Every structure is written in C-alpha cells, then in structure tokens.
Image (tube, coloured by chain):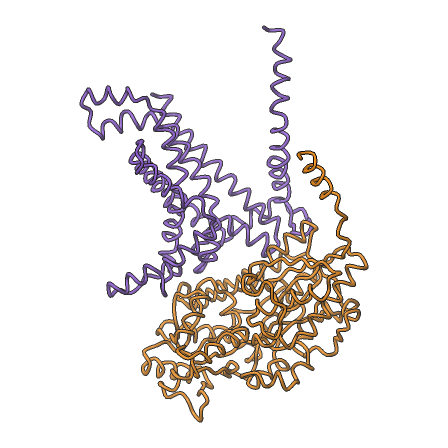
Amino acid sequence: MRWCGLLLLLLAGCAAPDQRPEIVVQRFFGECGVIHGGSTDVAAADTECGILTTLFNRFEAENPDIRLKVNVVAWPGYPQLAAQIAAGDPPDLVTMHQSVISDYQDRGLLEPMDGVLVEAGVDAATFTPAARAGVVKYGRVYAMPWDTIGRLFHINTRLMAQAGLMRDGKPVLPRSPDELLAQARQFKAATGKPYLVQAHVNAPDFHVALLYTYLLAQGDTIFPDARHVRLDTPAARQVVALFRQLHAEGLTTRNQDFPAATARFVQGGGGIFPVGTWMIGPYDAEAARPGSALYRSYAIAPFPRLWGQDAAFVDGHAWVMPRAARSRSERAAIARFLGFLARYNADWSRTGQLPAFQPVLETDSFRALPHRGDIVAIASTGTQLPEHVRRQSAIQGLIGEELEAAVTGIKPIDRALADAERRVNRLYAELP
Amino acid sequence: MKSGGAPRRLEGLAFVAPFLLLYGVVLIWPLLMGIGISFHRADLFGAREWIGLGNYATALADPVVHQAIGNTLLLALLIVPPLTALALLLALALNRATRGAAVFRGIFFSSSVLSVTIVTLIWRFILTPDAGLLAVAADALGREPLPFLSDQALVIPAIAITTIWWSLGFPIMLFLAGLQQVPADVYEAAALDRAGRWTTFRHITLPAIRRTLLLVVMLQTVGQLQLFGQAQLLTGGGPGGGSRTIVLAIFEVAFGRWELGYATALAEILFAMILVVTLLQYWLVTRREDAG
C-alpha cells in the first residue's frame, strides 16, 4: 500500500508540463473574486472590478489554449511594477494610467505596441482623440487605451433644490470663483451641510486634478519643458486660495480620506463631490435605490468654468506591455487577449469611464446610458499632459501633498506652491 | 589538548560556515553594495553615475528628510518607553500560574499576530473623525471629533498608540521569560525581611531582569526607527509630511521616484542612526553594570 502511494506520487510528478502559452496580466481595480469569481456573463457584471473579473473569466473559458495568470495589485501598483521590472520579471500586460506611460516609455521599459495591436485587429485610428493623446508618444503607440477618465461634479440635486440652486430641473453651477463662494455659503445656510465633499487626507491626486484643470482653463503652461514645472504662479495661487477659503469657512468636508468622502456623499452629507467618471456607475445605482439619500436626486456635470475657458484635465487607463523577451506564441496570445478586451470596451463604459474607441462612443447604447450625454464631449476636448511630462505618478504625490497642506492651512499658499515647484524640479534635475 | 586546538577550531568554523555564508550573501554583501550605490546618481533600472558624497549632501539639506528624521525619532520616543513600561507591568501582573493569567497572556499576545494591514484597518475604524469609534463617542458626549489622522499635532500620537497596541505581545513574552528566571527563594527571603512590593520590585526584580529590559528597549528602538507600514497605510505620510518616517521616505524615493542612489544614501543614514542609538543604549547600561 505504501509503495502504491509512493508510485502514485511519482506518477503525479511526471505529469506532462503545460505547453500552453502563458500571459501574466497585472491589474488594479480591486479584488472581487468572491462575488464574480465564476461568472462569465459580462453584460450582467457591474463595477470596474466585477466587469474586469468577468471579462477575464470569459477569456479563459473561450480560449482554453492560453494560460491566463492574473496579479491583482493595490492601486496604483507602480512601486510593485518598478520592482518587478528592476528584478527582470515584469508581467506581460499591465494596467497603467495614460499620464504615467511617458515615465516608462522614456526609460525604454515599454514595448511599442503598433505591431501587436495590428495582430489583435485593433485599429489605432479608432481611438478617441483623448485616448490617442494618452497612448501615442513620439509617433508610436505604447499602449492599448481602455478608457478616458474625466473629473466631474457629482451632484445631490435634492440638497441643491433645498438650497434654491436648481433651475428647470438642472443644478445651478457657478461661473466664477466669487459665485462659487456665494453659492457654497447659500447652500450651507439652507441645508446646514457643506457644499463640497472632498478628500483631504491621503488623497494627493484629488487636489492635483482640480489645480491642473483650472490652470489649463487659464492657459497656463504647467510643464514648460521636460525638466521643469511651473506652479508658483498667480494663476495657481488664486486656484489654491479659493479652495483654502472653502476649507476655512467649512464649506467643504474636512479631515476625510477618499473612502470616507465617498461614503459621505452617498449618505447625503454634502452637495457636490468633485471626483472622477468612475463613480457614475455606483452613484447611479444609489440613485435607483429607494431609501438612499441619492434616490432620484443625482446629476453630474463637467467642472464649471471658473476662470478662462472650458477645460478638462483628463487621464485614462491603458494596457501596456513591459519590455521582455517573449516567444511568438506568447505574443500571439497577448494579441488575442487585447483583441478580446477591445471588443468589450462598451461593457467597460458602464462603469462611468468614457470609452477609448470612437465607434463605441457613437453607439446608441452608449448614449442611452444615464448622464453620458452630459460628458461625452470630454472624450474629444479633454486635455492630457504633454508627452514630455515624466514621473507623473511621483510628481502627483509631491504636488498633492503640498496642495493638501495649503488647502488645510498647514502651510501658507505661497510656500506650499514654491515647495511643490522646488521638489518637482529637484526630481527632474536627477533624471538621467 | 593544545594539539587538538586547530582542528577543533576548523570543526567549529565548519559548523558556523553555512550561516556565515548566508549572512554574508543576504546581509553583508547587499549592505556593501548599498554603500557603493549611495555614491552614485543611480536609478532603479541600472543607470549609474558617480557623484561621490552628492546624495549625502542633498539629504542633509533636504527639508523633507529633516522632517522625516524628526518624525521617526519622535515616534520612537513616544513608542519605546511607554511600550516597555506597559509590557513590564502586564508581564508582572500575568506572571502567575493561573488559568486567568494564561487567558490574558493569550489575549495580549493576539494583536501581535495580526498583519500591519489589519492593524491599520482596525485603527482607521477607531480614529477616523467621520464615523470612527472615537468620533461616535465624542458625538455622544456632545464634543467635536478629533481629526487624529489629518492634524499634524495628533497624527504622530495616533500612530504611536496604534503601534503600541500592535507591538505589546512580544515584549510581554520576553519579560515573562525573564521573570520566570528569577529564583523564587530570593522573593521568599525578601518576604521574610518584610520587604514591600515596590522595594522587592526595585531591588530584586528589576536588577534580575536588567538584561531582558535592555534587550526589549534595544529591539524596540531598532524596530520603531524602521516604522513603515502604519504610516504608509494610515496616513500616507501626511498631512503635509507630518507622519512621514525615514523608511517611508526611502520607499517613496526608491520605488516612486526611482532614485535608487538617493534612497540608499538615506538608508545608510538610517543605518548609522540605528547603530549609534543602540550602541549608546548598550554603553549606558553596561557602564552602570561595570561600575556596580
């Protein structure tokens, strides 16, 4: 009996190796295997995590000749990716913000994807203008765009109505900094709640998106060249001063991190939550749920024009291929996977993110999704950072930390902006 | 006897050689490599340019590094003495062979087995001013909740309390082990002499566990000077860098900014700090013993 067991063990060890090509996909967007682990019904899935998990399940089911290995990393996952690349063991495909692609492309760490996209049947000419600006660097395609992320005003219309800030069923939004302050004070007086819901703790990208948007609106050049940032300017000072004033007067929520701010808005704790397109899906679900503070009381709008002209700083998610030696069969597997994902881009847009492909943007089914008519223009007019801007992920952390300090009153505005400029320029001075 | 000395030394070396080899490869070699890299402008992906002491000069002039060093020292100061005192008190209380003491020993040790992610999650639920446990309590008392994670004056104490709660188990175990080594007849003699509790503690217990006390203080100092996870997960080093520790700064510089040369220079500075602090502690304690 004991010999039989040993023989079985030996035979098990002699099993034929798996000859299928393996692709390692690394993504953020969270882990939800418990809910969506076995599902392949993409149309029934919801949330970013749910849709992506279901898509991966479906790919595996439809392509049994490919071994798909998925690494889920905590957002944004760049420290892990940098360590993996430095160790010579990068994944095959990685989710990456379009604003970060230049960092890796400039250092020669990404493979141009023109060829693999052709093999996948993905035509780069079908990318939306915003998506194209995000993934094309110096004439070559370095990623397959997945969406365009815009920042919006998510609005609790019940509270806005209570404050007398609704007209013809639409929220009345400010057209200048003074109007914003006046409306915020009016809102607080009528509802007793802050006008804005914001994350001020451990959320550096929050203020950076606001600053970039309103600097672009004023025609300011934030990154004049590849080695300098310009933040210590009158335009930047007046943007930060406005948000400092809102904070000082209690017209915005205070002391909240991103999860707390997200929950606060759902609970009806404030009027407007200036956050990204990715919250449209979850908040729409709340707006349809009787008993929710947002029930039939939810609207969205692009950031209002407070200075200069309409402008939206946009970013997006994309799939990049870190540079590595790969066999022909592995490349073919990657191409098939990318082609599969591209075909499901319309499903991804149910999250609230704007599609990366123009044909999807023009479909009736996309336009029929709630609120999309209000924001569809962002995919064409949204402004990405110039392609020479490097280390955006690290820079966003540095600028965001100084902005948090300025807005919450820890540092004087002038000093915070000067410190942000100094810290970013020092980082650029160290680049090879 | 003398003729067998050399072979015996070789035998002894053979026994410790595998460990020494591993120690050299895993610790000494990376340490030397780190020192070498710190003299370069180096990125994470292999670029190297010799700049001598440039990274050290930058670090000495960098206000972010000054703030991180200050935060780290303050955290060590707020954590190590209370943690040592609390662990010693609990060990004294639990140093008895009863079922209740065994249960409490288990309870106090239980927090130590949690990962830093779980610990910070628990303490976020306690500290967050929006709906945290302390905020609910403050609300019930009609007071404004304190912003523990977003006020520069409160964030370091908040991280210190989180760390003390998390780290209590191991020092308690060390003290219990030390206390159980003290001979019972010494206590009996003290009781016959009608020595009070404080006198017994001061003149018998404390001298007997002096070495354990030194070990706990040194281990905790070394550990807390390398505090990382709590600051990264609870506050991300904020607000305004108010809770950024040196290791968090090293992590950001190396893996966020890819400045490996600068990060290794910071790591060497931290190494020197730890070495100086622990040697100082050791010297202070052993000097008294020698004098005694």
Outermost residue toward the left in this view? B194
Residue B73 in percent (x, y) is at 42, 45
B72 or B172: nearer the viewer: B172
Q: Quadrant of the N terminus of chain B?
A: top right
B256 or A402: nearer the viewer: B256
Q: How many marks?
A: 0
Identify the residue at horizontal 38%, vertical 21% (top origin): B290
A199 or A185: nearer the viewer: A199
Q: Is residue B47 something one can see in this rendering?
A: no
The chain painted purple is B
Residue B87, quarter of picture: top left
Task: Give the drawing colour for chain A.
Answer: orange
Residue A24, quarter of picture: bottom right
Q: Is B150 rendered above or below residue A262?
A: above
Q: Is residue B87 left or right of residue A30?
A: left
Identify the residue at horizontal 53%, vertical 72% (top origin): A209
Q: Is residue A142 left or right of residue B119?
A: right
Q: Is A199 rendered above or below residue B159?
A: below
Identify the residue at horizontal 44%, vertical 60% (top origin): B240
Q: Is residue A79 something one can see in this rendering?
A: yes
Identify the residue at horizontal 39%, vertical 37% (top origin): B171
Residue B288 in percent (x, y) is at 36, 25
Residue A187 in percent (x, y) is at 36, 82
Q: Is residue A112 left or right of residue A38?
A: right
A214 or A263: nearer the viewer: A263
Q: Is B253 rendered above or below residue A263?
A: above
